[in-house]
Image (cartoon, grey):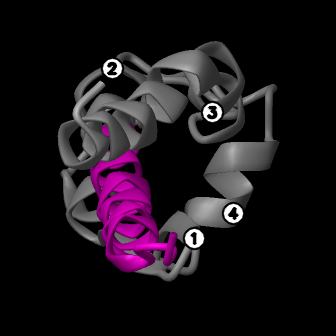
Amino acid sequence: MPIDWSKAQQAEQAAEAGVAAAAEALLDEVRSVYIPVKSGALSASGMAKAKGLQASVGFTKVYGKKQHEREDFEHRRGQAKFLSEPTSKFGPQLEQHVAEAMSRVLGG
């Protein structure tokens, strides 16, 4: 019996789409709850990039790293570690984006 690899290729493509969706979901969560907001420029500089099964979420404003790391800064809205905390906290939900995308393709 020959092996039909088309489902495997579809599953891989679905997983890649799920990774991209998870990165966008994380960016949305960071923007809506965690990122410090004064003018909105830092939030607006956010980006989510995905390539294959890897993704990154970050912010392009130069001061973003300092805002992320300095826990002694006071923020009216948002907090330090605005990427680290939600990534840890919402890891299972991010993985669920990948699982759901693959499930749709594999029929599970």
User: How far separated are the C-alphas under marks 3 and 4?
Assistant: 16 Å
Residue 76 location, quadrant: top left
37 on left or right of 96: left
* Mark pair 2, 4: CA separation: 18 Å
- Between discs 3 and 4, the one toward the N terminus: 4
Callout 3 secondary element: helix
Q: Nearer the viewer, mark 1 or mark 2?
A: 1
Give the amino acid type for the residue marked by disc 3 in the picture: Thr
Q: In the depicted view, which residue is nearer to us: 21 or 47? A: 21
- What is the number of the mark on residue 42? none
Q: Measuring 31% from the left and 69% from the top, which residue is drawn there?
A: 10
* Number of the label disc, if any, that sits on residue 87: 3
Quarter of the figure with the C terminus? top left
Query: Outermost residue toward the front?
Result: 1
Q: Which residue is mark 1?
A: 53
Of the pair 100 and 36, the residue shown nearer to us: 100
Q: Is residue 107 above or below residue 66?
A: above
Q: What is the magenta range?
A: 1-27
Looking at the rendered image, the disc whose residue lies closer to the viewer, 2 or 4, is 2
In the picture, the disc for residue 33 is 2
Q: Secondary structure at mark 4?
A: helix
Please tell me whether the stretch drawn in magenta is mainly helix, strand or loop: helix
- Between the C-alphas of marks 3 and 1, the distance is 16 Å
* Nearest to viewer (mark 4 / mark 1): 1
